[in-house]
Amino acid sequence: MAKDLQVLLSDLGQEAEILELEKLKLPLFGSENRPVADTAEKLTDQMINASAFIFCAPEYNGGVPPILSNAITWITVQTKNWRDAFNGKWALISTHSAGSGYRFLTAFRSQLEYLGSNVLARTIAVSDEKPLDKDSAKRILQGLIDAIK
């Protein structure tokens, strides 16, 4: 889904970088467990320098995927103010899940708002039975573009 949204953003004249958390191999966060500084710092810098976020994730066990929660935790401990990477930035949440993805969308919205992000009201939800509606997705993406101008 991320690649599909990246293409749609390109059609709208925007660039988007895809961050694949699986490739970062961040260890599970713990107070005694610190990753190679470069990995967490690079991710944090990318998030701080982003003008907005589009999160694409599946629903796991009725909530946020552990890899996403783990990455957010690492980001929040890398900055002086734990909200620095998120505060005041617009975010769009999207999901490709077996079901509706509603529980993920709801839980992650709450988490992002707590971190200070302005979460776009509209979301993008895709499943095997409900493919990506490109026209609808473009309108939602345009809403994000308009919000950050």
Image (spheres, helix red, strand yellow):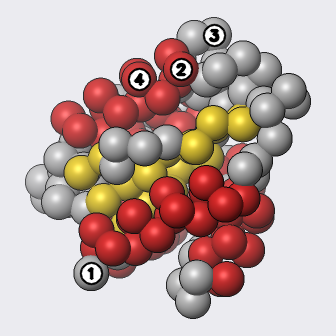
Residue 148 appears in the rendering = yes
- Front-lying residue, 138 or 67: 138
Q: CA distance from mark 1 to mark 3?
A: 36 Å
Q: Circle 2 is placed at which residue position?
A: 102
Distance of label 1 from label 4 (alpha carbons): 26 Å
The residue that mark 4 highlights is 106
Q: CA distance from mark 2 to mark 4?
A: 6 Å
Marks 2,4: beta carbons within 8 A: yes
Name the mark on residue 61. Answer: 3
Name the secondary structure under disc 1.
loop
Mark toward the start of the polypeptide (1 vs 2): 2
Q: Answer with the quarter of the image where residue 94 lies.
A: top right
Q: Earlier in the sequence, mark 4 or mark 3?
A: 3
Q: CA distance from mark 1 to mark 2?
A: 28 Å
Q: In the rendering, at what x and y percent does residue 139 appear?
A: 52, 62
Residue 90 in percent (x, y) is at 30, 59
Q: Are marks 2 and 3 in contact (CB under 8 Å)?
A: no
Q: Secondary structure at mark 3?
A: loop
Tell me the residue at 26%/62% (across/down): 89
- The residue tagged 1 is 149
